[in-house]
Amino acid sequence: MAKFGIGQAATRLEDRRLLTGTGKYADDMPATDFAHAFVLRSPHAHALIKSIDSATAASQPGVLTILTGADVAADGLGTIRCRSGLENRDGTSRGDTAWSILAQGRVRHVGDPVVLVVAETLAAARDAAELVDIDYEILPAAVDTRNAAQPGAPMVWDDIKDNICFDWGQGDQSATTKAFDQAAHIVELELVNNRIVANPMEPRAAVATYLPDTGRVELTTPSQGTHILLEQLADDIFKTDPSEFRILSGDVGGGFGMKIFMHPEQPLVVWAARRLKRSVRWTADRSESFLSDVQGRDHVTKARLALDAEGIFTGLEVATHANLGAYLSNFSPFVATAAGVCMLAGLYKTPAIFVNVIGVMTNTVPIDAYRGAGRPEAIYVIERLVDKAARALGYTQDELRRRNFVQPQDLPYATPLDTVYDSGDFAALLDRAKEKADWDGFVARRRDAAANGRLRGIGLTSYVEKCGGGNPETADVVFNDDDTLTIYIGTQTNGQGHETAYTQIMSDRLDISADRIKIVQGDTDFVPPGMTGGSRSVTVGGPAVAFAAGEIIEKGITVAAEELETAAADIVYKDGAFSIVGTDRKLSLFDVNRLAGESGLDTVYAHTPDAATYPNGTHICELEVDPDTGDVEIIGYTAVDDFGDVINPLLLAGQVHGGVAQGIGQALMEHACYDGESGQLLAGSLMDYTLPRADNMPHFDFSTLNFPCTTNPLGIKGAGEAGAIAAPPAVINALVDALEPKIGAVDIDMPATSAYLWSLINGGI
């Protein structure tokens, strides 16, 4: 067995570089001879641009150029295009928006880019921007997710009636209506999935290096896949040949979905560099990030569950208003609909389901995928609703779930929302989680907490998500002269440990040491197309690497057999060498590569997944609430997950820990809230928007009970988003459990801040 193979809890190869400060992030590009860009943004949520006077600003020392929407139009630049088509329930197409890289004629959210100032220094650009005189005519703004879709609300786009971009549905409406007509019990719930700012450690940046000999521009930017940005720059914005650009991403300090998408600043610096024939750079400060990074979630949902007299689910009906912001980001309609709606079935055998999603335009920052991309929103709905049904009908939290779980003998199981679960034992994971969380001892712990004046609650969620399917990933393996090989792959690490995981797979398959394997990502001149998102890097990219290794061995057997003068059937590959069975005659992998001709054993393998994977599990949260202050302390958090076969248990635990932390943050603290009249972002800095800190987190008890995936060649299921999916409903269900003995049945929305909970306890809400 390889010393660095599949299944081993190896520490990350990247860690020494990243922890010693030698990582290479976008803003680490040498500062020599770069001009600096500053983006002047709209202070208004909705306004007409009557005039822009930049003459005084342009005359300031060090200013190189000032560009506006009029210049965008004059140069014939295109817009940031929504790449997600969608059909309404009536068969018509969704609405569309023209997202210009600088506003033309109207601004539609606070932070909308209006003017680009480029100067020799950032200070000079900022100073000049203060002298740009813009005459705005302020218009009424629509910011509330549901109210914006009501007749009479201010219109964000003149051609999108009632701000409804799409009216989409999935499921069998007739069968669902019948289920409710015949139901013995109906449980209803209305809830909000609060808006989130991604807040990665590394802010967005764009560094456009102009190459005077060719006129080419190299854009260095943190991304989740460089090719999607190259396609948009060439096809949508500049309408030119992709060879005119090179996109590079080095180390990336977090993405969480937000760095998949093109933002205006990336084409802006490329445009400025091409006009000036000079390299130009821009890096967001944290305030800019709050006003311009694509945000996540923001759903308002009404859900109903129909049950028979024995507590068996017979129907589910869900109606959601999904906020899309002021412009359609690259995949926002998909995220609000097909990406996650299929998960509303949960782990349950509900025979009839119908879902309606209304996509709503508002005068807010655009919305797109945030860790989980639709699946957390769906699981939050179904797991909150099932929990409420259990309480309303007198079942324990686990009993009602167990009655309705898809059973192992039902697999593969097709849900009414066009998904097919292939593997797992959902009740077994629930039982394991209860055991590890000492569920049976909770009554005594609650009694002890009550004696100390505290409200103790326990909540669970049994989740499932769909990930690791869709488009192919390609591994391009090239042998090097120094007896190493390089894997070029289009996914992009954002801190997950891709270098380690891919190296483990190749080391395992080729039985060579890790130091002979190099991983290259983030360079459109060398890597094949690909993207990190939806927990697909190891689930889709991993098999591409594994299959490439298999092809290398097959090629090598043919070459070795010829060189060793024997039949291919007599050649065995082991310990990094090809040998004749039963003899000591052998050739190393790298010797065979040299014998294989001009291209050696170089191999390109594109893997297209046959189906998605369905990681699942049960998470249990136990917490206490101080009724005098509303403060919440999470006492314990237990996660038992099914991720199929595991590449690296250490990386897996890190992914779950990070996702749970983000889920707890959304449940208790984070909220990008806007003023209803002015449209100003009220939580526009880290002083107003509360991120979770280390002392908000409990010890995570994480373990797995894995059932190999039958639809993935490596048997693996995606893991990167599980924690962010499971944590919010587990936390809120625990809060409901904690408050119920004191104030009775109550619905709680996120974020459940201490002030909010104190008001609930004291009758203020």
Image (cartoon, grey):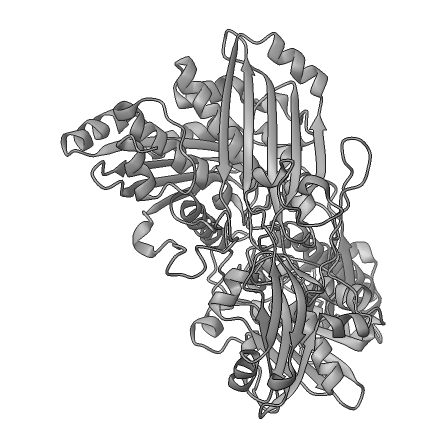
Q: Where residue 267 appears, x then y in whole percent?
A: 70, 71
206 relative to 702, above or below: below
Q: Where residue 765 appears, x then y in whole percent?
A: 35, 33
Q: Where residue 764 appears, x then y in whole percent?
A: 31, 33
| Rendered residue at 34%/56% (across/down) | 693
445 relative to 234, above or below: above
Mark yes or no: residue 613 visible: no
Q: Which of 61 and 388 lies nearest the eye of the viewer? A: 61
| Rendered residue at 80%/41% (across/down) | 93
Q: Quadrant of residue 43?
A: bottom right
Q: How many marks?
A: 0
| Rendered residue at 48%/78% (across/down) | 22
Q: Where residue 366 appears, x then y in whole percent?
A: 61, 54
Mark yes or no: residue 604 visible: yes
Q: Which of 51 and 174 lies nearest the eye of the viewer? A: 51
Q: Quadrant of residue 269?
A: bottom right
Residue furthest toward the left? 451
386 relative to 649, above or below: above
Q: Which of 53 and 164 lies nearest the eye of the viewer? A: 53
| Rendered residue at 60%/13% (across/down) | 180
Figure quadrant of the N terminus: bottom right
Residue 400 left/right relative to 249:
left
46 relative to 202, above or below: above
